[in-house]
Image (cartoon, rainbow, N blue to C red):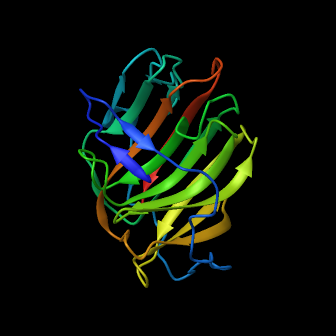
């Protein structure tokens, strides 16, 4: 996601994200590639994730479901995550859930994100997913790869529950289609990245770098699936 500094289970995760659509130099397609296979490859259960924190935003399994909650902590630098322990080859992902955010952070560096990443040591590889910036409560589709970062705003001030999906294209491995509640939203292109059939890890994470109290802000992920 834009500039990702190191993240490890025992260390620090830094996903510095910029906001808005301006960095998407390539116009999104108006229609998805309907030929792409969207048959689920594998469900990702609660037990497949490491849950960790750097301060006080403690992730936890949601009892009675297959879901995970990752709250936003409120220390000056607070990074919390649910990170898949081992990955799988995939062309996309889907989950049901919400990004309960706000507009009270000092900058867009404070964020919530759910994504697939093919590098979980330096966090500078290919990534595709969804990010909400907490200075403006804007949810965006995003791609990272090859030192480039592209976003497209999907909604603002929507803290409700939806089904989120991203699917890489086999016909053009630089492109990913994004869906919300089964409806196509946009296609992002990053010619410096490649997204189809990589060895990915499923990740949900929050980062807080200051602002007024973010109590109640959190990610909830249910029915995590890779394609």
- Residue 94 appears in view: no
Residue 99 position in % (x across, y down): 62, 38
Going by the image, does 89 lie left or right of 29? left
Q: How many marks?
A: 0
Q: Quadrant of residue 126?
A: bottom left
- Residue 135 appears in view: yes
Seen from this angle, which residue lies furthest right?
157
Going by the image, does 113 lie left or right of 31? left
Going by the image, does 192 lie left or right of 215? left
Which residue is at 23% across, 44% downward?
121
Seen from this angle, which residue lies furthest front?
106
* Above or below 38: residue 66: above
Going by the image, does 155 lie left or right of 15? right
* Above or below 204: residue 130: below
Which residue is at 55% across, 51% downward?
130
Which residue is at 40% across, 33% downward?
82
**In-front residue for pair 160/28:** 28
The image quadrant where one finds the C terminus is bottom left
* Above or below 146: residue 54: above
Which residue is at 54% across, 38% downward?
112
Residue 76 position in % (x across, y down): 48, 19
* Above or below 27: residue 139: above
Residue 21 position in % (x across, y down): 64, 62
Residue 102 position in % (x across, y down): 69, 32
**In-front residue for pair 54/181:** 54
């Amino acid at each position: 996601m834009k500039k990702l500094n190191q993240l490890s289970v025992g260390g620090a995760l830094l996903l510095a994200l910029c906001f808005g659509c301006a960095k998407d130099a390539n116009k999104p397609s108006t229609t998805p590639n309907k030929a792409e296979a969207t048959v689920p490859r594998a469900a990702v259960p609660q037990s497949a994730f490491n849950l960790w924190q750097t301060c006080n935003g403690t992730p936890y399994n949601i009892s009675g479901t297959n879901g995970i909650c990752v709250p936003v902590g409120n220390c000056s630098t607070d990074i919390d995550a649910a990170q898949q322990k081992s990955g799988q080859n995939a062309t996309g992902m889907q989950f049901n859930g919400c990004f309960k955010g706000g507009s009270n952070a000092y900058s867009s560096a404070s964020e919530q994100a759910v994504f697939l990443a093919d590098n979980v040591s330096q966090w500078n590889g290919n990534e595709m997913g969804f990010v909400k910036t907490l200075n403006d409560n804007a949810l965006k589709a995003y791609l990272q790869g090859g030192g480039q970062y592209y976003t497209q705003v999907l909604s603002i001030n929507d803290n409700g529950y939806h089904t989120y999906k991203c699917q890489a294209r086999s016909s053009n491995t630089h492109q990913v289609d994004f869906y919300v509640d089964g409806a196509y939203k946009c296609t992002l292109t990053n010619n410096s990245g490649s997204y189809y059939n990589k060895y990915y890890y499923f990740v949900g994470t929050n980062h807080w770098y200051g602002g007024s109290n973010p109590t109640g802000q959190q990610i909830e992920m249910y029915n995590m699936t890779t394609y």
